[in-house]
Amino acid sequence: MTDISTQKTTRTQGKFDHLIYVLRENPVTLLAFIMFAFIILSALVGPAFVPYDPLETNASRALQAPSWKHWFGTDSVGRDVFSRVIVATRLDLSISVAAVALSFVIGSILGSIAGYWGGWLDSVLNRFLDTIMAFPLFVLAMGIVAALGNTIENIIYATAIINVPFYARLVRAEVNIRRDAGFVRAAKLAGNSDLRVLAMHIFPNALPPMMVQVSLNLGWAILNAAGLSFIGLGVRPPTPEWGIMVAEGANFIVSGEWWLAVFPGLWLMFAVFTFNLLGDGLRDLVDPRKRT
Amino acid sequence: MSLRAAQSIPVVIGVVIISFLLTRALPGDPAVYFAGAAADEASIAEIRIALGLDKPVIQQFFIYVGDLLQGDMGQSISSGQPVASDLANRLPASLELTLVALILSCGISIPLGILAATRPGTWVDHLCRVLVTAGVSLPTFFTGIVLIYLFYYLLGIAPSPIGRLDFISLDPDHVTGFYLIDAALIGDWETWLGAAKQLILPAITLALFTLAPIARMTRAAMLTALSSDFIRTARAAGLSNRKVLYVYAFRNALLPVITTLGMVFSFALGANVLVEKVFAWPGIGSYAVEALVVSDYAAVQGFVLAMALMFVALNLVIDLLYTVVDPRIGFVAK
C-alpha cells in the first residue's frame, strides 16, 4: 500500500516538474496561461467592475471617439463600448464552453461505444460522422440554427453538433488501441463489468489528448458563435456580444467611426488567440514529440 | 478510380438525408408557415396537401429526393424564383471569389512554408510561425472590416465595398459568369480592372484566413521530407540543391499539403458567407444570409445542400489528385 502511494507522489511530482520545465522552456505558454486567467476573470467579475451600464443609452454622447472617459468610445446610441465588450465576455465564453462541453460528452460516449464494441455500431457511427464532416461546418451550423429556430440555445447545439466528430474520432482511436491491453484484461478478470472497465480504466487514458482538443476547440467555438451572430443568428441586439457588435460597427466603418467594430473584434481575436496558444502549450505538455 | 467515386455515394445519401431532416425540422408547422399570416384552417390544409405534408415521412423523403433529382429545390419566398436557379445565378460570383482567394493564399503560403522549412530558426521561420498562429485566430468578418477601414476610408485606394462592379460599369456579357474571364474574353480591360479592384479586398480577406493552415502544413511536410533518408542519399549523390528541394522533397511534401487544401476549402466555403456579407458580394453566401433574415427556409436549406454537394465533389477531386501526385497510391489496394 505504502509502495503505491509513494509511487503516486513521485509521479505527480514528476508531472509538476515537467509543467514547470515546459513553462520555463516556453514562455509563450506561460503568457497563454496569464491571458487565459485574464479572460476568465473578466467573464466572472467583469460585469461588476465596468464603469457604465452596457445597455444604458444616452443620445448626448453618441459616437464619441475613445477618450479617458470612454476608453473604447461610444456607439451610435451612446452606449459605452468598453463596458459592452467586457460584459460580452461572459456570454461569448458561456456559449463556447457549453457547446464544447456538450460535444465533449456526446463525442466521448459515441467514441467509447464505437471504439470498445466495434462491429456494426462502429461502422454506423463512422458513416454518420463522415456525413457531418461532408458539410462545410459553418454552413451546417447555419442550416441547423435556421431549422431549429433562432435562439442562443440553438447556437450552442449547432456548435456542439459540428464539433462532435472531432471528439468522437479521437476517443474512438484512443479506446480502440487499448481495448485488449493487459490492464484491461486484468480489470475484467477482477470482475469489473464492461461499462466500468470502459469508463474507469480505458477512457481516462483518452483525457490528455482530449484536453488539447478542448482548448483548440474553444477558440473555434467562439469564432463560430460570433460568426453566426454576425450574420444575425442567435444573439439579438441590444445584448452585448462580440459578433453582433462588430456587425453593428460595420455600418459605421465607411464613415470613419472605427472604434465601434475594431474593439470588439480585437477582443474576439484576443480570446481566440489565447485558446489557440493554450492548446499548443497543452500539446507540448501532453505530447512532447508533436512540438512544432 | 470508379471505386473512389462509388465511395462518395453513401456520403451523398447521408447529406441528402440530413438536409431533408433540416427542412422538416422547421420551427412549427411548415404548412402554417408557407400559407402565410392571413391563412385560415382550410387553406392551411390545402397547402399541407399541396406540399405533401399529409403523407408519411418516408414517402415525403422519396418525393424530396425525386424533386432533387429533377433539380427542384423548392421555391424561394423572397425572390419568387426556384431556389436552384437563384443559386446557379449567384454561384459564379462565389466561386470567382473563393478561387482567386485560394490561388492568392497558395501563392504566398507554399513558398513561405518552403522557405521556413529550409531556413529553420531564421526570420522567415519566425514570420511563418507568427502568421500561422495569428492567422487561425482572425475572425474573417473582422479582417474584412479592418481592410475596408484601411484601404477605403483611410487610404482611399479601394473602391467602395459594395458588389462585384461599381455602378458606372456594365456587367460583361455572361459567358462563364466569372467577371474577370468574361471581361477578358471580350477585351474590355476597363471593366476587367474595375472587377479586379472590387475583388481584391474580399479575396485578400479570405486568403488571410486560409493562409495559416497551408503554410503550417507545407512547413511541417517539408521538414519531414527534408530529414528523410532519400534526401540524404540524393544529396550524397551530388544532385543540385534546387533539384533536391523541388523535385525530391517538395513532390513528397505535396501530399499532406493537398489534404490540407481540402480542409481549407471547407473553411473557405464557410468563411465565404461572412466575407460576402461584409463586402455585399452578390454570391450564394449573401443569398443565404438574406434568406435567413426573412426566414426563407427553402432557400437556406437549398444553399446548405448545394454547399455540401460541392464539398463532396471537391473531396473526390482531391482524392483523385493524390493518384496523380503520388502514383504509389491506388484505390484498388484499399
Image (spheres, rainbow, N blue to C red):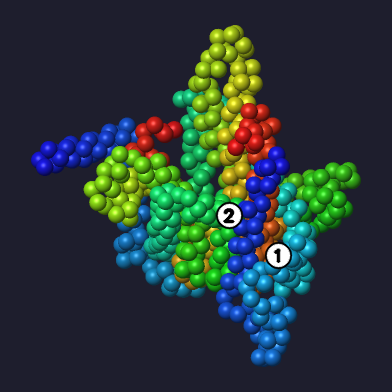
On the question of residue A226 being in view, the answer is: yes
Q: Nearer the viewer, residue B51 or B78?
A: B51
User: Which chain does the numbered disc 2 sit on?
Assistant: A
Q: Secondary structure at mark 1?
A: helix
The residue lying furthest to the right in this view is B186
On the question of residue A37 being in view, the answer is: no
Q: Which residue is label 1 attached to?
A: B65
Q: Nearer the viewer, residue B291 or A108?
A: A108
Mark 2 belongs to which amino acid? Thr
Q: Position of residue B214 (x, y in %)?
A: 57, 38
Mark 1 belongs to which amino acid? Val
Q: Residue at x 14, y 42 (%)?
A: A5
Label for residue B2? Answer: none
Residue B168 position by quadrant: bottom right
Against A217, residue B227 (above or below) is above
Tag count: 2
Position of residue A15 in the picture relative to residue B57 (left or right)? left
Q: Residue at x 25, y 38 (%)?
A: A15
Q: Which residue is label 2 attached to?
A: A131
The residue lying furthest to the left in this view is A2
Position of residue B11 in the picture relative to residue A17 (left or right)? right
Q: Residue at x 72, y 50 (%)?
A: B95
Q: Position of residue B199 (x, y in %)?
A: 71, 48
Q: Residue at x 76, y 53 (%)?
A: B92
Quadrant (top left, top right, bottom left, bottom right) of the C terminus of chain B? top right
